[in-house]
């Protein structure tokens, strides 16, 4: 097989590809899931309080309530499945699909990488994320309106995620 | 190695109504090496890796007599690139493909991409 790509074509494409993160494939997600399973097996004896996932659901829940959004409204805003959003907020051990995490990260204006770590999709090298996540999850409770402590916890955690 | 692509030339067929059921080259995986990604390094070593890999998939499709038809599931950060910069048809989120968006390229779109 021979590719006949002209210099003009390469120049034109270079302009369009500038800074684009090009990737594709269900296979990529399978690798991610496989790493996640490996991580779960490897950390089976680790302390349960290192799991950052409860903080992910809590972050989404508090952020949504702070913005005064119903679950269906956030699902629509982020272009994600409502059933998955419900699962994220209610099941502390749920690991959402990477696409869902990406959409939520974009909606919240936070780093995709940090959100992937927080959601349990990838392993965080930086242990402070797990510690901050646990501290955050412990400080917030599910009530209709955010109290001052929850408000402060949310703001501090969002600040931490934005800084890293 | 500056990037990697995994494709299959059998077992997948087109979903776009105008070419439904016809054979295509399906891209299972496409990625540039981390040192070529602007999101990871400040000065990527090579650009164009994605475009060249996609052109290769189209060329393979032509060689297989599939007229350049290809299909793939995009990762979210690349959705816009496949839709706007490659002119592929967005068939929406695919529950069978980890809810990723499925994109397909027709023979006409492939010809336009290679121009």
Image: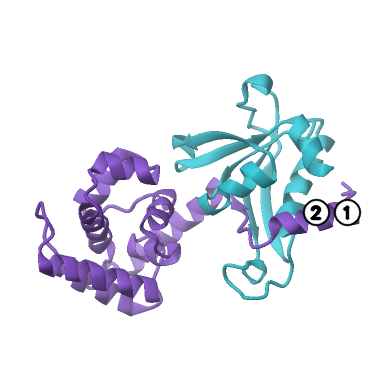
Chain colours: A purple, B cyan
Q: Position of residue A107 (x, y in %)?
A: 38, 53
| A72 up-or-down from B23: above or below | below
Discs 1, 2 touching: Cβ within 8 Å: yes
Q: Is residue B21 visible?
A: no
Which quadrant of the figure has residue A124?
bottom left
Q: Position of residue A35 (x, y in %)?
A: 44, 61
Q: Do the residues at pointers 1 and 2 share their chain? A: yes
Disc 1 to disc 2, C-alpha distance: 6 Å
Determine the secondary structure under disc 1. Answer: helix
10 Å crowding of disc 1: few (<14), some (14-19), many (20+): few
Q: Position of residue A153 (x, y in %)?
A: 19, 70
Left or right of B102? Residue A140 is: left
Residue at the (64%, 21%) spot, across then down: B20
Left or right of B1? Residue A106 is: left
Q: Position of residue A156 (x, y in %)?
A: 25, 73
- Which of A117/A16 is in front? A16
Q: Chain of mark 2?
A: A
Left or right of B43? Residue A48 is: left
| A108 up-or-down from A153: above or below | above
Q: What label sits on residue A42 in the rendered view?
A: none
- Residue named by callout 1: A8
Q: What label sits on residue A12 in the rendered view?
A: 2
């Amino acid at each position: 097989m021979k590719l006949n790509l002209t210099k003009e074509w390469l120049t034109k494409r270079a302009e369009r590809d500038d800074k684009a993160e090009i990737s594709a494939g269900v296979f990529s997600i399978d690798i991610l899931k496989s790493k996640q399973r490996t991580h779960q097996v490897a950390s089976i004896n680790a302390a349960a309080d290192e799991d950052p996932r409860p903080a992910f659901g809590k972050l989404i829940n508090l952020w949504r309530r702070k913005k005064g959004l119903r679950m269906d409204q956030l699902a629509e805003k982020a272009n994600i499945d409502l059933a998955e959003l419900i699962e994220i907020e209610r099941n502390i051990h749920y690991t959402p699909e990477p696409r869902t995490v990406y959409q939520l990260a974009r909606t919240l204006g936070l780093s995709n990488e940090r959100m992937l770590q927080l959601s349990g999709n990838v392993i965080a090298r930086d242990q402070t994320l797990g510690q901050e996540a646990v501290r955050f999850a412990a400080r917030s409770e599910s009530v209709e309106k955010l109290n001052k402590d929850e408000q402060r916890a949310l703001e501090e955690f969002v600040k931490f995620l934005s800084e890293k | 190695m500056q990037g990697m692509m995994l494709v299959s030339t059998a077992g997948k067929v087109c979903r776009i109504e105008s070419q439904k059921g016809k054979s295509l080259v399906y891209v299972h995986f496409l990625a540039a090496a981390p040192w070529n990604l602007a999101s990871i390094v400040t000065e990527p070593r090579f650009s164009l890796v994605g475009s060249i890999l996609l052109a290769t998939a189209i060329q393979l499709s032509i060689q297989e007599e599939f007229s350049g038809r290809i299909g793939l599931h995009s990762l979210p950060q690349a959705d816009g690139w496949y839709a706007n910069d490659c002119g592929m048809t967005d068939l929406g989120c695919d529950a069978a493909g980890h809810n990723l968006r499925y994109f397909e390229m027709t023979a006409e779109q492939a010809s336009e991409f290679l121009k």
